Amino acid sequence: MRIFVLAALFLLSLPTFAQPALRAKQLAEFADGLSQPHDAAFSPDGKLIYLTDMRNSRIQVLEAMTLKPVGRFGAGQLSYPHDAEFDQAGRLVVADTGNDRVAIYEIKGAQARLVGELKGLAGPEGVAVMPDGRILVTNTRNATLSVFRDGKLVQTAGGPGSRDGELRNPHDVEVASDGTVYVVDSANNRVQVFDAALQHRASFGAALGLSGPKYLAMDGDRVWLADEYNHRILLLDRSHQLLGVLGSGKRGRAADAFHKPEAVLARAPYVWVIDTYNDRVVLLRID
């Protein structure tokens, strides 16, 4: 009886993961020449996506709704880029990880001109732009979040650790429409939530059983999160409750099976999964 009670208590202590599977239909796929793509950004008009083709050290430009290639750029300038985001001026801001900088491009379709950079970073893998124009950058090597205004470093947040506000191997940073900041604290298997002044407000992830989460996407009041080592994509509401799951939790290659996906874009009812270790991006419609 004692063994039974202890076993029961152990099982009750484990996180419970409801797995409400989302129904998805694959509409398109692009894999031609990609090598560990990481994250992507919509063009300001929403017609194109700019994909960080990490191991090829370039940006691949695709039509959003067909995934037909439009062009690419960055070869010879970028080194293992991980993330990209457009600022209010329509410039593409790229986490140029291998060069320890953020590269800033003026963009016209698939044509790009390097016009600026932010230096002094330490393995930057996530970048976001605040409504007031500040640029936020995650540094994986020193576990910090750097804040730039008008090209100058004005604030540093975080630091190594697992307490509230501390980080371990931070990857993505995203900003909601109300200025709330989400940082994917990858090695702590959680997402931390900060206000616009970068004061810690909440954390979530333990109840979700995350394993190496990497990049997330905001779509209205919903949050999509790539849970890399669980081979799945999670859909959450703004209170961080699980609404649905893409992927079985096992490695695969299908509309609902991925191999260590690192990122996702979303614009209901469509989702673009950056299926990193299958070297592809796939466009899905969620039914």
Image (spheres, rainbow, N blue to C red):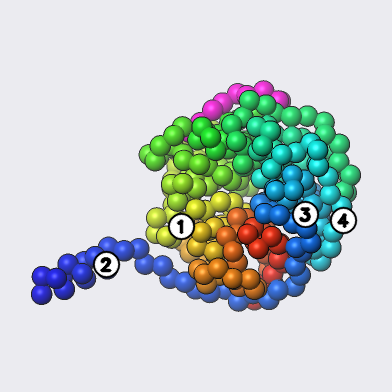
Query: Which residue bears the numbered disc 3?
Result: 49
What percent of the width, then of the height, locates residue 72? 84, 49
Nearer the viewer's eye, disc 4 or disc 2? 4
Question: Which disc is residue 12 wearing?
Answer: 2
Q: Is residue 119 left or right of residue 167?
A: right
As helix, strand or loop, the secondary structure at mark 1 comes to loop
Q: Quick check: 66 left or right of 84?
A: right
Quarter of the image holding residue 226?
bottom right
The CA span between labels 1 and 3 is 27 Å
Mark 3 lies on a secondary structure that is strand
- Sequence-first disc among 1 and 4: 4
Please, what is the three-letter code of the amino acid marked with disc 2? Leu
Determine whether the residue tagged by mark 4 lies in a helix, strand or loop.
Answer: strand
In space, the residues marked 2 and 1 are separated at their CA atoms by 18 Å
**Percent from the top left, x then y, of residue 283?**
72, 67
Q: Earlier in the sequence, mark 2 or mark 1?
A: 2
Residue identified by numbered label 1:
210
Q: CA distance from mark 4 to mark 2?
A: 52 Å
Amino acid at the residue labelled 4: Val
Does residue 247 lie above or below 178 as drawn?
below
Range drawn in magenta: 150-158
The amino acid beneath tag 3 is: Ile
Kindly indicate whether the residue at mark 3 contacts the one at mark 4 (C-beta within 8 angstroms). no
The label shown at residue 89 is none
Whole-number angstrom distance, CA of label 2 to CA of label 3: 44 Å
Residue that label 4 marks: 70
Q: Tell me residue 200's x, y (percent).
A: 45, 38
x%, y% of residue 249?
50, 68
Is residue 33 toward the left or the right of residue 195 in the image? Answer: right
Q: Are marks 2 and 3 in contact (CB under 8 Å)?
A: no
Q: CA distance from mark 1 to mark 4?
A: 35 Å
